[in-house]
Image (spheres, rainbow, N blue to C red):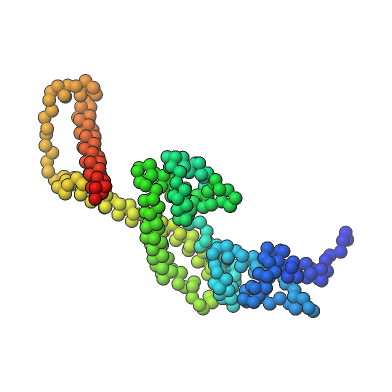
Amino acid sequence: MSGAEPSAATTRSAAEYRIEDLAHASGATVRTIRAYQDRGLLPTPERRGRANVYRDTHLARLRQIADLLDRGYTLASIKELLEAWDAGRGLGGVLGLVAEVHGPWTDEQADRITRDELYAKFGGVQDDQAVAEAVELGVLERIPGRDDEFLVPSPQELAVAVELHAAGVPLIAISGHLRELRGQVEHIASRFLEFTTEHVFARYLGHRPPTDADADAAEAASLVRRLRPLAQQTVDAELARAMRMFATRHLQHHLGADIPLTTEPSTSKPRSVPLPPETMQAVQRLVGPRDVAAFVAAATEREVHARTLDALATSHNESKQIDQNG
C-alpha cells in the first residue's frame, strides 16, 4: 500500500473545531457564536475537559443562520423556524422553500448607471434631491465606494420615469406618484398572498409536523414557482381593462357626451357627401382611379384624428391655465 488510511481519530479531529476555529471557518465572531448559543440557536457543544468542541453541524447551522439573516429574517423568527424543523421536519426542504420565495419575482435584470448618464437621461437636469428620493424609493441603490454610480434594480421603472419627465411631468410629481402607486400595489400583493395562503398554502403552514416534511416543502416550493407569475398576469389584465374604461370616459368628457366612442358598428345608414369635381380630379391624378375611395377615406380618418388631438391639447392647456390661475 502506498499509504495508511486515516484513522477514526484523525477523521474525527478533522470535523472538530475550537470556538476560535469555528469563528474563522464560518465568518462569525466568537462573541456572535456565544450569543447564538445563549439564544438557543446553536446545538450545545460537546464538553471535553475544560474546552467546548464544535462539529460540522455547528458550522452548517451558522451558515444557515447567516443565509436567513441576509434574507431579512430576525433572530427570533430564525429560532422558531429552526426549532420547528428540528422537532421532526427536515431543514433542507424548508430552506429550499425559503430560497424559492426570496428568489426573483421578475425576469428583469438589474443594471448600473453613472450619475452623468442619469442626468443625461433626464435632459441634463442635475437634481440631487430627486436622486436622493430615488434612492429612498429603491429606484436607485448606492454602490459602496462609488459615489458616481448607482445600481438600478428595475431598469423598466427608471425608463418609465424618464418618459414621464420627457412628456413634461416634474420629477417631484413622478416620485409622489410612485409613492402612492407603491402603497396600492403593496395592498394588492398582500391580498393576493392572503388569498393563495388561504386556498393553497394553508396545509403547509400548520403547526402539526407533516408526515414527509421535505416532500411537502418541495411541493410548496413548486407551487410558488407556478403561482409566481399569476399575480402580475392578473394585475396586467385588470390594469389594461381599467385603463381602457377610464381613458374612454376621459375622452368622452373632453370631447362632449354626445360623441359616441364605441367601436360597435353604427345602426344608422352611411350618408354620401359630394366632393367638388376639381378635388376628385386632383385625387385621381395623385393616386389613380382605383384608389380614389381609399385615399379619401384615409384622409378623412386622419383629419378626424387630428381634430381629436387638437381638442385634447386645447382642453389640456385650458385646464393648465385654470390650475395656474387658481
Residue shown at 33%/52% (left/top)? 240
Residue shown at 11%/34% (left/top)? 272
Q: Quadrant of residue 259?
A: top left
Q: Is 62 left or right of 143, judged from the image as shown? A: right
Q: Position of residue 135 (x, y in %)?
A: 48, 53
Q: Is 66 left or right of 325, judged from the image as shown? A: right
Tell me if residue 97 comes above or below residue 89 in the rendering: above
Tell me if residue 155 comes above or below residue 61 in the rendering: above
- Looking at the image, the residue that sits furthest to the front is 325
Q: Position of residue 215 (x, y in %)?
A: 55, 69
Q: Position of residue 139 (x, y in %)?
A: 46, 52
Residue shown at 66%/69% (left/top)? 32
- Locate the N terminus by quadrant: bottom right
> Can see residue 192?
no
> Can see residue 77?
yes
Q: Position of residue 69 (x, y in %)?
A: 58, 65
